[in-house]
Image: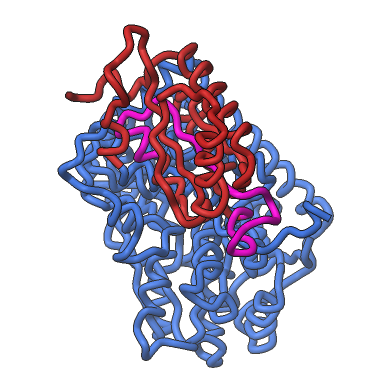
Amino acid sequence: MGACYLAWATDEKIRDRAANGGFVTAVLVAALEKDLLDAVIVVKKEDVYEGIPTVTSDPETVVECAGSLHAAPINLTRFVVEFYKDERNKGKKIGLPAKPCDARGIIEQAKRQQLDINDVYLVGLNCGGTLHPLGLREAAAEIYGIDPDAVVKEEIKAGKLFLSLQSGEERECKMDELEERGYGRRDSCKMCTTKIPTMADLACGNWGVPKGEEATFVEVLTEKGEALFRNALENGYIEVKEAPEESLEVRERIKNAMVKRAEEWWQKLDVVRELTRDERLKFYVETLKLCIHCGACRIVCPVCACGDAAKCVSMHDERDDYVISMYNMIRLLHLMDSCIGCGQCEDVCPVDIPLTLIHRRFAERMQRKLNYTPGMSVEEKPPFYEAELRWHDIL
Amino acid sequence: MLAAVNSSGKAEAEEWQPKILAFCCNWCSYAGADAAGLERRQTPPTIRVIRVMCSGRIDPAFALMGFLEGADAVLITGCHIGDCHYVDANYKTRNRFEFLKEFVDELGLEPERLRLQWISASEGAIFADMVREVTENVKKVGPSPFRKSWKK
């Protein structure tokens, strides 16, 4: 475990805009202004339900994008990969606020030589989950009883989801209640067990921040994280104090509670578990039969790196009338060791195939067998491609 | 591949005969299959052999395609570990087979339908035994569920 601090931005403007003390924004602004980073990728708020990932070198824009957007479940990995596809950007340093699934996706891409992890500074964010924009709209109308378009702000605090209207009126509902009624977080988030981005360079969040204090709890995890942190501190962008023992405990307790909850959700959402072998096959055939092969899941997938020559595309032929298409078969096979469970594929699927569930079913058993968790460290190569000689097996 | 799976052997016997797709390495198990014939070993006429230059050439996707085409079982055969003509390719086969095994099991096909066997060029007996064994096992579990919905 790295050194832990409570930190907050010195700039009042940042503190006001940001969620908890503005540490993340301040660190990115400091890194840009002191030339530690060439650009940052932030999500620009369009409205409550939409955010647009933006590459910028302008500190003003970064400040504008402060604060979290829970209902814009974007994975930034593909945007980082696109950034480095441009020859002019080779070798540039970029930074971004990263949820655990962003950070894991970027690490998986680094393993596949799509980017150099030393160039990417990951300011990790603790993540309790994101909401699907459509789900939130429906919830606003049905549970909160307000016009979805009139919502100007959403906030998750202490297990409650707050929606604010233009008039300043604020309505709240318990997250658990929302989820019982079929709204709330996305399925992938409900069952995600990576709540603190220990694979990123910094891990920031409000878990463990004492009540009433406006600060961010920060764990410095790597040398890159240390560089970002020092740069912001020494140039006066942030103020810090040592995190008290109590904060550490609270953070750990919240994390453990959420992980436990996630495991319960997985038990509940995994409808395939109860099925017999034949029923299982039927389930997969019936659900994957809906696929129209638009390829959207492949495009958003943060761990795919095959590009246009991908096997799942080249071995697939629209004229085949297989019960499950080669596209789906190969994608499921290739993601068995690498699926990080981010749920992007399900979000974009035009025919609503429960891809998060299916991929997790296939991936979980293989990852458990290999004792491998994807996206945790660049050193651990994907086991599917493992090719080195294993002489100790024979000798 | 479609042709290999579809071509039935001799006239169909009254009892249902499975169709088994076998990938054989040019340097060992293909010669092993040959040896089984030379040694006059009786094998059921259930297998369709596809020769590959190395078991490392067998992408798990080939096996999956075989299943989708209606094969009742897929055999992957290659040289013993350490004997590979291309030094280390059968290590890769072994690694990929682990994935394939889990995949087929999760998908809902019986584990009997998939097998990896190391057979050297002189092991005709092992080849014949393997075919016999797999044929019996597959007869027990019946036709592939993919075949039931298989048109034609």
Q: Residue at x 20, y 35 (%)?
A: A321
Magenta run includes residue B86: yes
Q: Look at the image and give the residue range highlighted in magenta.
A: B64-91
How are the residues colored? by chain
Between A4 and A314, the one lying in front of the other is A314
Q: Position of residue A8 (x, y in %)?
A: 62, 70
Say which chain is blue. A
Q: Is residue A334 left or right of residue A153?
A: right
Where, by quadrant of the figure, is residue B82 drawn?
A: bottom right
Say which chain is red. B
The quadrant of the picture occupied by the C terminus of chain A is bottom right
Judge whether A88 appears above or below A25 on screen.
below
Q: Position of residue A387 (x, y in %)?
A: 61, 61
Judge whether A12 appears above or below A205 on screen.
below
The quadrant of the picture occupied by the N terminus of chain A is bottom right
Between A154 and A352, the one lying in front of the other is A352
Q: Position of residue A138 (x, y in %)?
A: 27, 35
Q: Residue at x 63, y 82 (%)?
A: A232
Q: Residue at x 41, y 25 (%)?
A: B46
Between A255 and A245, the one lying in front of the other is A255
